[in-house]
Image (cartoon, helix red, strand yellow):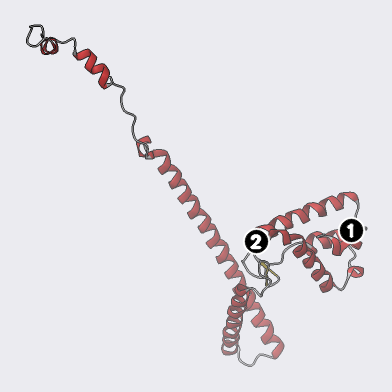
């Protein structure tokens, strides 16, 4: 069902390519099931993605390399932000516009306005084309800095989580067995009946049993 929109392209694949497409489709379906509210909808969501990509391309007839198109463009998720539920600016779990993408676009627009003002102030009198090229170049540099900062922050977060996991494992290893919440086992001892029976053999007990040494009437 998921590959139905590319049935015509499928016919142009050899057996090895078909196997690789099936593997790629299974991987995408597994990822979709992890983010969808109803995992059973994963095949239909993937089919809708393929159909949308075909419409974006202009139809199957314009695809000259079916295998590369299916595996690198048709099946893969294209997030417009860092949210793993985002695909082309749309939330996979709700079908609504991605709020995080909207925030990203808003921030980018703000940065473009700020950079344009800096260009106009630092390089007054530029022609329109030169001005656009300068703004685009500065936007690219800013995006590269942001991407590097994101990578650094993600690496720091992974390192921090690894340290926390190591600390938890060390604490668990050093915790004594008595801290497990279980009550310690009592040492085995003689029961009350056994102690009473043993006590009858002592001299004091014998005298009490015979009423001071004299037989009881």
* Residues at marks 2 and 1, CA–CA distance in whole angstroms: 27 Å
Q: Secondary structure at mark 1?
A: helix
Relative to 197, say whether 12 is above or below: below
Q: Which residue is mark 2?
A: 35
Residue sitting nearer the eye, 2 or 216:
216
Relative to 169, say whether 190 is above or below: above
Residue 204 position within the rendered picture, expressed as x and y whole percent measured from the top left: 11, 12
- Which residue does the image show at 70% across and 90% down from the upper left? 128
Quadrant of the frame with the N terminus: bottom right
Q: Which of marks 1 and 2 precedes in the sequence?
A: 1
Residue 48 position within the rendered picture, expressed as x and y whole percent measured from the top left: 78, 67
Q: Residues within 10 Å of mark 2 (few under 14, many from 20)?
A: some
In the figure, is residue 149 to the left or right of 34?
left
Quarter of the image where one finds residue 9: bottom right
Query: Mark on residue 10?
Result: 1
- Which residue does the image show at 64% across and 74% down from the upper left? 140
Quadrant of the frame with the C terminus: top left
Q: Secondary structure at mark 2?
A: helix
Residue sitting nearer the eye, 145 or 180:
180
In the figure, is residue 2 to the left or right of 130?
right
- Which residue does the image show at 65% across and 63% down from the upper left? 37
- Which residue does the image show at 55% across and 66% down from the upper left? 149
Residue 75 position within the rendered picture, expressed as x and y whole percent measured from the top left: 78, 61
Quarter of the image where one finds residue 141: bottom right
Relative to 18, say whether 118 is above or below: below
């Amino acid at each position: 069902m998921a590959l139905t929109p590319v049935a015509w392209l499928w016919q142009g694949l050899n057996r090895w390519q078909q196997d690789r497409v099936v593997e790629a489709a299974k991987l995408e379906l597994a990822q979709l099931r992890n983010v969808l509210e109803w995992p059973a909808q994963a095949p239909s969501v993937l089919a809708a993605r393929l159909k949308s990509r075909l419409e974006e391309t202009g139809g199957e007839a314009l695809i000259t390399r079916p295998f590369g198109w299916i595996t690198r463009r048709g099946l893969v998720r294209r997030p417009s932000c860092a949210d793993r539920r985002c695909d082309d600016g749309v939330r996979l779990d709700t079908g609504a516009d991605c709020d995080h993408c909207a925030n990203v676009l808003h921030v980018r627009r703000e940065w473009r306005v700020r950079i344009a003002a800096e260009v106009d102030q630092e390089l007054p009198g530029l022609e329109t084309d030169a001005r656009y090229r300068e703004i685009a170049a500065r936007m690219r540099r800013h995006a590269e800095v942001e991407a590097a900062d994101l990578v650094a922050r993600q690496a720091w977060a992974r390192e921090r989580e690894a340290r926390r996991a190591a600390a938890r494992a060390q604490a668990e290893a050093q915790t004594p067995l008595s801290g497990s919440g279980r009550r310690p086992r009592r040492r085995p001892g003689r029961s009350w009946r056994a102690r009473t029976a043993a006590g009858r053999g002592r001299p004091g007990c014998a005298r009490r049993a015979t009423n001071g040494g004299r037989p009881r009437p």
